[in-house]
């Protein structure tokens, strides 16, 4: 079931989600357990990571007992490439908090055997006890992670082909569409549905159509995010523009 949480603006939305994550981290630490976070890239979660860094610096939020698993990575890009998602996570979050480096996981875009590396990634998530809270953005194709349509609940971590719309949407970051990889490794829709909680963030009018399809259309592989309707604890955290096309409730 999707709970819709529409905030007055994205700053208010981000503050609420960061407080939620901080509560989870502190609860787990008090119980002597690690918090396992699933993390996303893209422009949407950047202010969330900035707020988590602020909570670390100004309010003593420690990440020493946090383990993270990122959703996806471009195939062919190593951690030193400035468009790799490993690089993004280091710059946006990991370099600024006290998380043990070995507790941060991003799929390996250079793995010589992507199928074996993907299976190992699934095993690592299980060995960590599963993901407590997965942060998601949404692509205009309805993708979550890099699960382009068609993709359904049976999909697990694997190498995928990127949709041309997704490549165009990301071309600005690479400077030239020819430089945007054609493949990526991503957690599957099924991997995401196994997370104990899911929080999907979306801002701006450009996301309004796909947010409506994901939240309201009958779940289908044509809009992978629509399978989140089958998750028992999924929040869509939106600003008014991203929520503008939802039916009145
Ligand atoms: C990429 C990522 C997704 C992300 C999407 C949306 O394709 N793989 O995880 O949700 O972009 O990006 P943005 O947040 O910049 O709109």
Image (cartoon, grey):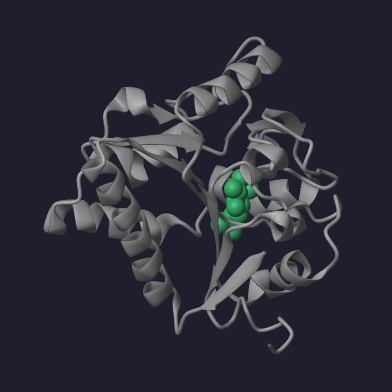
Q: Is residue 65 above or below residue 9?
A: above
Left or right of 68 on screen, residue 58? left
Q: Residue at x 59, y 81 (%)?
A: 241
Residue at far bottom of view: 248
Tally of marks: 0
Front residue of this view, candidates 249 and 52: 249
Query: Which residue is more in the foreground, 153 or 185?
Result: 153
Left or right of 202 in this view: 23:
left
Quadrant including the C terminus: bottom right
- Does 116 appear above or below 5? above
Q: Position of residue 63 (x, y in %)?
A: 25, 41
Q: In the visual, does 184 lie left or right of 79?
A: right
| Identity of the residue furthest to the front in this view | 31
Q: Quadrant of residue 220?
A: bottom right
Where residue 48 appears, as percent x and y from the top left, is 38, 59
Please provide percent x and percent y for residue 146.
68, 42
Residue in the picture at 80% in, 56% down:
223
Q: Position of residue 174 (x, y in %)?
A: 57, 43
Can residue 82 be seen here?
Answer: no
Given residues 150 and 132, the one toward you in this image is 132
Q: For the point 47% across and 80% down, which residue is it? A: 7
């Amino acid at each position: 079931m999707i709970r819709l949480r529409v905030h007055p603006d994205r700053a208010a939305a981000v503050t609420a989600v960061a407080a939620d994550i901080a509560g989870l981290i502190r609860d787990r630490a008090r119980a002597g357990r690690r918090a396992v976070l699933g993390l996303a890239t893209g422009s949407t979660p950047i202010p969330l990571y900035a707020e988590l860094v602020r909570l670390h610096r100004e309010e003593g939020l420690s990440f020493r007992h946090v383990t993270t698993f990122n959703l996806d990575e471009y195939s062919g890009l190593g951690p030193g490439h400035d468009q790799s998602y490993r690089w993004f996570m280091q710059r946006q979050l990991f370099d600024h908090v006290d998380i043990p480096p070995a507790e941060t996981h991003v799929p390996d875009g250079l793995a010589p055997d992507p199928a074996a590396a993907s299976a190992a990634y699934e095993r690592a998530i299980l060995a960590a006890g599963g993901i407590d809270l997965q942060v998601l953005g949404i692509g205009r194709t309805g993708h979550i992670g890099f699960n382009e349509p068609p993709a359904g609940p049976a999909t697990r971590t694997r190498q995928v082909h990127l949709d041309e719309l997704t490549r165009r949407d990301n071309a600005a970051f690479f400077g030239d569409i020819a430089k945007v990889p054609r493949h990526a490794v991503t957690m599957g829709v099924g991997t995401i549905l196994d997370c104990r909680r899911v929080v999907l963030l979306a801002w701006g009018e450009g996301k309004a159509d796909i947010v409506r399809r994901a939240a309201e259309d009958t779940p289908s592989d044509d809009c992978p995010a629509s399978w989140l309707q089958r998750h028992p604890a999924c929040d869509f955290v939106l600003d008014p523009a991203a929520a503008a096309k939802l039916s009145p409730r």
